Amino acid sequence: MTEGPIARQMIFFAMPLLLGNLFQQLYNAVDSAVVGHYVGDLALAAVGSSTSLINMIVNLFMGIAVGGSVVISQYYGARDQKGLHDAIHSVLAFSVMAGIAVTVIGYFMTPQILVWMDTPENIMPMSVEYLQIIFLGGMATVFYNMGSGLLRALGDSKRPLYFLILASLLNIVLDVLFVAGFNTGVGGAALATIISQAVSAVLILVVLIRTDEEYKVTLRDIRVYPKQMAAVIRVGLPSGIQNAIVGFSNVIVQSSINIFGEIAVAGCSAYIKIDGFVILPVMSMSMTLTTFVGQNIGALNYDRVKKGMKTGLLMGVGITLALSVCLQFLGGLLLRIFSSDPEVISYGLLMMRIESLGYFLLAISHCLAGTLRGVGLTRVPMVIMVLCWCGARVVWIVLLGRQLHNLSLVLAGYPISWFLSAVLLAVYFWKMDWIHYYEKTMRR
C-alpha cells in the first residue's frame, strides 16, 4: 500500500475487511435470529443481554492486537525481516495466553457478572448457559482475530475473509441444525458459534505455517521476543484498555436497559445486531487507515499518509450518512428478522431513531483514531474515547437515564458521547506534529 492510486487501493483493501466484518457480525446475529424465532423472545433477550459482556472481555485482547498489526506493518514497510519474524511469533504467543485468560475468566465469572448487570431473573439461566459455552471457545476467537489481523497488516485481507465466510456459513447450518432440528435452545446456538470459530482459527494457522513468504510461522519459534513484544504492548495496550473500558460502559448501558424488562431487552438487542452491521463500513475503513498509515509511515511516505487520511475520512462519513437515511425506511422490516412481536419491534425502532442521528460522528472518531494508531499514537485516542465513550456516557446514563427511568435518555448516551469524541479527536489531530512524533519515538 506504499504506492499506486490511494482511493482505489483503500477501497480494494477495505472491501474484504468489510465483508469479513459482515460475516463476523453474522455469528451473533444468526444466533439471535434463530433463537428468537424457534425458541422465543426470552431466548432472544438472553442472547442479546450477553453480547456486551462478551465484547468487553474479548475486545481487550483485540485492542492489543491492533498494536501487533501496527508494529508488524511498520516492520514490513521497512523491510526488516528479522523484526517481522520476531513480532509475528510474539503476537501468536500472546494470543495463546490471551485465549486461555478469556476462557477461564469468562467461564467462571459469568454468573456473578450477569447478576451485577441486573439481568432479569426469567432469562438468567439461558444467559448463563449461552455465555459459558461461548467463553469455552475463547481460544479460537482470540487466535482467529489475532491471526487475521496479522495477515491484514501484511496486506493480505482476502484469505481471512474466505475463511470467515466458510465459518459463518457453517455457523448458520449448525445453528439451524442444533436449535431447530435438535431443539437444544441457546446452548446449541452457542455451540454452533464456537465450532465455527475453531474452524476459522485452524485455517489461519495452517496458512501461516505452510506459506513460503517471509512471514512464515515456525511452531518452535512461537514465544515472546522482548523487544518486539514490548513494542506491541506499548502500541496496543492503550487500545486494549480503551476497548475494555468502552466495553464496560456498554455493559452499564445494557444493565440500564435490563431494568426495563425482558421485552425492552429483546427489542434493543435486536437493533444492536442491526447496529453492528451499520457501523461495519467505518470500522473497516478505520482498520484500513491503520494499515495504510503504518506501511506508508514506515516507508517515510508522509505526504501519502495525509492524503490517505482525508480519503478514508470522506468515504467513512459518506457511507454512514447514506446508511442512516436507509434505516429510516427499512428499520421495521429489518427488526422483523429477529422477532414478530410489535412491542419488541417498537423498542428496537426507538433505539434506531436515536442512534442513527450520530453515526456520522462515530465515523469521524473511528477514522481519526485509526490514522493516529497507524502512526503509533494510540494513547491519545484511548484517553479521548475512554473519557467520552465511558466517562461521559456512564455519567449521562446514571444521572439522567436511570434516575428518571427513561429509556430514551439511556440510549441518547451513545450519540452524545460520539459527538464529544469526534470534536476532541479532530482538535488534537490537526494540532499534532505526527511526523516529529514518529521520527522521535517509533524509528529510534
Image (tube, rainbow, N blue to C red):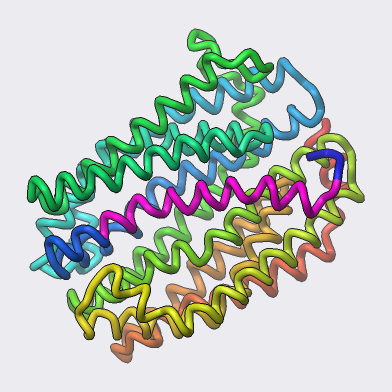
Q: Which stretch did the figure color magenta? A: 5-32
Left/right of residue 83 with respect to residue 360 in the rendered view:
right
Q: How many marks?
A: 0
**Is 397 left or right of 373, judged from the image as shown?**
left
Magenta span includes 31:
yes
Q: Position of residue 46 (x, y in %)?
A: 19, 62
Give coordinates of residue 347: x percent, y percent: 30, 82
**Farthest-out residue, top:** 220
339 falls in the magenta region: no
129 and 239: which is toward the camera: 129
| Most foreground residue, 57 or 312 | 312
Q: Quadrant of the N terminus?
A: top right
Q: Quadrant of residue 272?
A: bottom left
**Residue 85 found in image quarter:** top right
Q: Quadrant of residue 276?
A: bottom left
Can residue 420 be seen here?
no
Query: In the rendering, at what x and y percent does residue 331 appear?
Result: 41, 79
Relative depth, front residue between 401 and 43? 43
Q: Main secondary structure of the magenta part?
A: helix
* Point 50% across, 37% down: residue: 162
71 to 320, vertically: above or below: above
User: Which residue is rendered at x = 48% and y = 78% of the image?
Assistant: 327
Question: Where does residue 119 sit, x and y in percent of width and height?
Answer: 19, 66
